[in-house]
Amino acid sequence: MTILIEQAHDHFGNDVEEKKADINEKELVLDGGFVIPHSNSFGHSFRNYDVESERQEGVENFYRKNHTYQCYDFVKKMREEYGKLNRAEMSIWECCELLNEVVDESDPDLDEPQMEHLLQTAEAIRKDYPNQDWLHLTGLIHDLGKVLLLPSFGGLPQWAVVGDIFPVGCRFDESNVHYKYFKENPDYNNPAFNTKYGIYSENCGLNNVMMSWGHDDYMYLVAKENKTTLPSAALFIIRYHSFYAMHREGAYKHLMNDEDVENLKWLHIFNKYDLYSKSKVRIDVEKVKPYYLSLIEKYFPTAKLRW
Ligand SMILES: [Fe+2]
Ligand SMILES: [Fe+2]
């Protein structure tokens, strides 16, 4: 099965991926009867359109839904649901291969799979930071949470998997992309959630902050619950690599503690590779595989992880 993804950039240059697959219009019902509003705005065929305007429209539409539906309640339910880790048992490498079923359609090399992005990121970091093996592995696994798009993981809509992320439970910062759409979010007018600190306290640490749901938080949960020994900077990168308001705009500093500030330095380094390793450098997967398998073994106590 192949899911086609169209990749675009919003005006901050962030990656926004829009699924162009056969999502049906039915609402998505997770175990426990929780209903996710589900729609198909990306089911168009963009070949017949002006690609750029179509993309811009797609990005706007994406954030309208993302900002409307990603409220505190939604995030809490998703964390509870996916925190059970009862969807699959597989190794990291198996998950990389699974992610290959997701293809970026904006790429002229239509067949360039996600695995290439993971390995390109990891290998580019490895070249410049040969001694930081934990950062190589972080490059490999940072996007694995995108399996949430696959039917076997609930087939979540794009707005619940990719795009920029932001804290819920406190006021939405205006530096968040397409801020205007937060006005449709149920939390926007909720006095418990719409103050500077909301339910949090000064410098409480991002660890204690609920982030909008997506591939970042999911992979963070998977790594943490499977008892990874990766350093806290790695978990920080995994959980916040799409938190552009924080790592690019400098917002939400009042929620960060000293450890977050330290870890942010690594995220800034990582981010350069995440964005710019999407080059045409082809990776010989079989050649680098043994190295990454050794890292996985080093930093994960069990071969099969719960997902
Ligand atoms: Fe990502
Ligand atoms: Fe990435």
Image: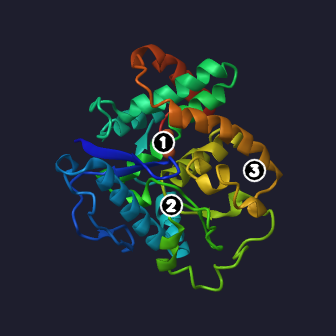
Q: Are marks 1 and 3 in contact (CB under 8 Å)?
A: no
**Residue sitting at 21 percent across and 56 percent down?**
44
- Position above or below: 186 against 17: below
Mark 3 neighbour density, 10 Å: few (under 14) some (14–19) many (20 or more) = some
Residue type indicated by callout 2? Trp
Residue at (31% x, 54% y) in the render: 53
| Distance between the alpha carbons at the discs numbered 1 and 3 | 21 Å
Nearer-N-terminus badge (1/2): 1
Q: Is residue 283 left or right of residue 300?
A: left
Q: Is residue 165 left or right of residue 97?
A: right
Residue 161: quarter of image: bottom left
* Mark 3 residue element: helix
Q: Nearer the viewer, residue 126 or 184?
A: 184
Q: Which residue is mark 2?
A: 213
- Vertical side of 278 occupied by 74: above or below: below
Residue type, mark 1 in image: Asp
Around disc 2, counting alpha carbons within 10 Å, would you say few (fewer than 14), some (14 to 19), or many (20 or more)?
many
Residue 294 place in picture, x, y as percent: 56, 22
Query: Which residue is painted at 39% across and 57% down in the image?
Result: 59
Q: Which residue is mark 1?
A: 143
| Vertical relation: 66 (above or below) 131 | below
Label ID, residue 260: 3
